[in-house]
């Protein structure tokens, strides 16, 4: 999956302000930008080639059936109620991660992140969620909800940065948590991205960025 850092064919209202090039905690650099419809073939290839554990974490099971309708839903967004970011190795252009939110109700959006195994534990998922949080707040969304496998340690660790209380079990090995986004904390976390602060410093920003929203609910 190779991604153009700055796509040529962009849809109306493409939010170029969310393009970023970041240095991760381990020194590697990534290019992050909003997804565009032209990414559909690369996204399909990434789903087909993903390891079983990544698919299990992202889709709460096996790989979905890849259809034109699915790819259109994943890549054709209004960048308001539905927003997604892709990340690539800034050197090779190889796609390495995707993060998205989809508005549910009452200003809450469901958030999901998938990161290539070789790029985990370097702060990429946290950075992408923070950029999504900035976009969400600017679009009237004040909370994130995440459904995930209860044994998904990376998601559990990410949520722990938000001081989230015990997740709400959904059954069948699933859990769900909701957090309320804090505008000042999110802004501070996004500003800190390019300075590559220490892990403890980043965690303090992340804890300010989100606070307990309450037990999750669906309408």
Image: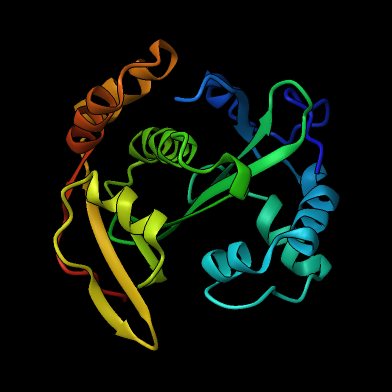
Quarter location, residue 165: bottom left
Q: Quadrant of the N terminus?
A: top right
Residue 61 in sight in this render: yes
Where does the image place residue 206, in percent across and percent down from the top left?
A: 26, 34
Q: Quadrant of residue 35?
A: top right
Residue at image location 79% in from the left, 70% down from the top:
66
**Lateral position of residue 11 relative to residue 130, left or right:** right
Closest to the observer, 101 or 93: 93
Left or right: 209 in relation to 56 = left
Q: Is residue 53 left or right of residue 183?
A: right
Rendered-image quadrant of the C terminus = bottom left
The residue sitting at the bottom extreme is 172
Q: Residue at x 60, y 49 (%)?
A: 117
Residue 183 visible in the picture: no
Q: Residue at position x 33%, y 37% from top?
A: 137
206, above or below 8, in the image:
below
Whether residue 29 sits left or right of residue 107 in the image: it is right
Q: Nearer the viewer, residue 115 or 36?
A: 115
**Between 93 and 73, the one nearer to me in the picture:** 93
Tell which residue pokes out farthest to the top in this image: 195
Decide: is 21 above or below 58: above
- Percent across and percent down for residue 3 are 78, 34
Quarter residue 186 falls in: top left
x and y percentages locating residue 28 in the rendered image? 58, 22
Q: Position of residue 7 (x, y in %)?
A: 78, 27
Question: What's the colour scheme?
Answer: rainbow
Q: Residue at x 16, y 49 (%)?
A: 163
């Amino acid at each position: 999956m190779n991604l153009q850092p700055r796509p040529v064919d962009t849809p109306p209202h493409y939010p170029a302000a969310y393009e970023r090039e970041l240095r991760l905690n381990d020194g590697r650099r990534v290019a992050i930008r909003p997804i565009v419809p032209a990414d559909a073939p690369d996204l399909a290839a990434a789903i087909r080639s993903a390891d079983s554990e990544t698919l299990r974490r992202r889709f709460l099971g096996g790989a979905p059936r890849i259809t034109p309708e699915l790819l259109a839903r994943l890549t054709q967004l209004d960048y308001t109620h539905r927003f997604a970011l892709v990340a690539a190795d800034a050197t090779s252009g190889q796609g390495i991660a995707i993060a998205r939110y989809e508005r549910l109700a009452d200003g809450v959006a469901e958030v999901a992140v998938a990161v290539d195994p070789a790029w985990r534990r370097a702060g990429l998922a946290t950075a992408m969620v923070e950029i999504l949080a900035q976009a969400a707040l600017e679009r009237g969304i004040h909370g994130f909800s995440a459904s995930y496998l209860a044994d998904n340690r990376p998601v559990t660790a990410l949520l722990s940065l938000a001081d989230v209380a015990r997740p709400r079990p959904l059954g069948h090995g699933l859990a769900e948590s909701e957090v309320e986004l804090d505008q000042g904390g999110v802004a501070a976390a996004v500003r800190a991205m390019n300075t590559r602060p220490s892990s403890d410093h980043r965690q303090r920003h992340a804890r300010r960025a989100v606070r307990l929203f309450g037990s999750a609910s669906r309408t």
